[in-house]
Image (cartoon, helix red, strand yellow):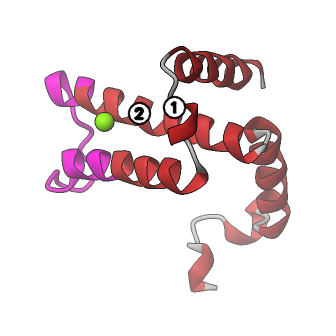
Amino acid sequence: VTELDDLTTRMREFTQARDWVRFHDLKSLTLALTGEVGEVAELVQWLPVGVVPDGELWQRLGDELADVLLYLVRLADVAGVDLGQAALAKLARNEERFPAGTYRSVAPERR
Ligand SMILES: [Mg+2]
């Protein structure tokens, strides 16, 4: 997936230019990713169900989702995982596991 490859390369260059590679072990990146997911949760935790934020909150949500994606891309790179290929393979397995004809409008865990 070209866009993910580009992000991976940009994040690798960003990290190398700052001599931060030595800080980017799997544990530290996983904790950083988790922290960013927490920042997303903090923004939406008290929104009524079904409400999509707008204005400044929407902008901040985009920033935090970007942080999540950038750390995820970096974590996959350090782990040697081709994130685009892994995601496509997982989606294909989920499509087989949860056929639309069987699972339409039914939460998987309720079957
Ligand atoms: Mg953040």
Residue 60 placement: quadrant? top left
Please state the horizontal and vertical placement of residue 53, each as a whole percent of the image. 22, 35
- Neighbour class for label 2 at 10 Å: few (<14), some, many (≥20)? some
Q: Quadrant of ligand 1?
A: top left
Q: Residue at x 61, y 35 (%)?
A: 73
The magenta stretch spans which residues? Answer: 38-59
- Work out how far the residue at label 1 is from the one at label 2, CA to CA, in angstroms: 5 Å
* Amino acid type assigned to the residue bearing label 2 in the image: Asp
Residue 40 placement: quadrant? top left
The N terminus, quarter of image: top right
Q: Residue at x 41, y 33 (%)?
A: 67
Query: Where is mark 2, residue-wise?
Result: 67
Image label count: 2
Residue 94 placement: quadrant? bottom right
33 falls in the magenta region: no
Could you say which is closer to the camera, residue 59 or residue 80? 80
58 falls in the magenta region: yes
Q: Residue at x 84, y 49 (%)?
A: 89
> For this view, does 90 lie left or right of residue 49?
right
Does residue 67 lie above or below 8 as drawn? below
